[in-house]
């Protein structure tokens, strides 16, 4: 199953190597603003990234 990951400023960017072991990562994004609650802290980045992930699946 395709999986998208968005990593925001407060998260650990080193998580990728662990995520790739257990999931089929097809979309990876890293943002330098936002944090633990990106829907509240950076909704523009979050919704843009969600749209980009699903648009790629529709192609």
Image (cartoon, rainbow, N blue to C red):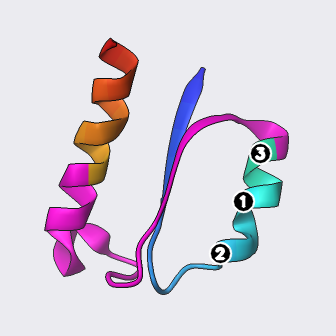
Identify the residue position indicated by label 1 in the image.
16
Whether residue 33 is situated above or below residue 55 in the rendered picture: below
Local secondary structure at mark 1: helix
Residue 46 percent location from the top left of the image:
26, 59
Toward which corner of the image does residue 45 lie, by quadrant?
bottom left
- The answer to whether mark 3 and mark 1 are in CB contact below 8 A is yes
* Local crowd size for mark 2, using a 10 Å CA cut-off: few (<14), some (14–19), many (≥20): few
Alpha-carbon span between mark 2 and mark 1: 7 Å
Toward which corner of the image does residue 32 lie, by quadrant?
bottom left
Q: Which residues are magenta?
A: 21-48
Q: Which corner quadrant holds the N terminus? A: top right
Residue 41 percent location from the top left of the image:
22, 81
Whether residue 10 is situated above or below residue 51 in the rendered picture: below
Residue 37 percent location from the top left of the image:
32, 75
* Local crowd size for mark 3, using a 10 Å CA cut-off: few (<14), some (14–19), many (≥20): few
Identify the residue position indicated by label 3 in the image.
20
Name the residue at 23% across, 39% down.
51
* Local crowd size for mark 1, using a 10 Å CA cut-off: few (<14), some (14–19), many (≥20): few
Alpha-carbon span between mark 3 and mark 1: 6 Å
Name the residue at 38% across, 82% down.
35
Mark 3 and mark 2 lie on one chain; the one further toward the N terminus is 2
Position of 30 compared to 22: left or right? left
Q: Nearer the viewer, residue 12 or 58?
A: 58
Q: Nearer the viewer, residue 53 or 11?
A: 53
Residue 5 forms part of the magenta stretch: no
Whether residue 6 is situated above or below residue 14 in the rendered picture: above
Position of 50 compared to 40: left or right? right
Local secondary structure at mark 2: helix
Identify the residue position indicated by label 2 in the image.
13
- The answer to whether mark 2 and mark 1 are in CB contact below 8 A is yes
Alpha-carbon span between mark 3 and mark 2: 13 Å
């Amino acid at each position: 199953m395709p999986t998208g990951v968005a990593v925001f400023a407060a998260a650990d960017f080193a998580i990728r190597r662990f995520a790739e072991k257990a999931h089929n990562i097809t979309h990876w994004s890293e943002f330098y603003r936002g944090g633990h609650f990106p829907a509240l802290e950076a909704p523009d980045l979050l919704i843009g990234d969600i749209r980009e992930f699903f648009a790629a699946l529709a192609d």
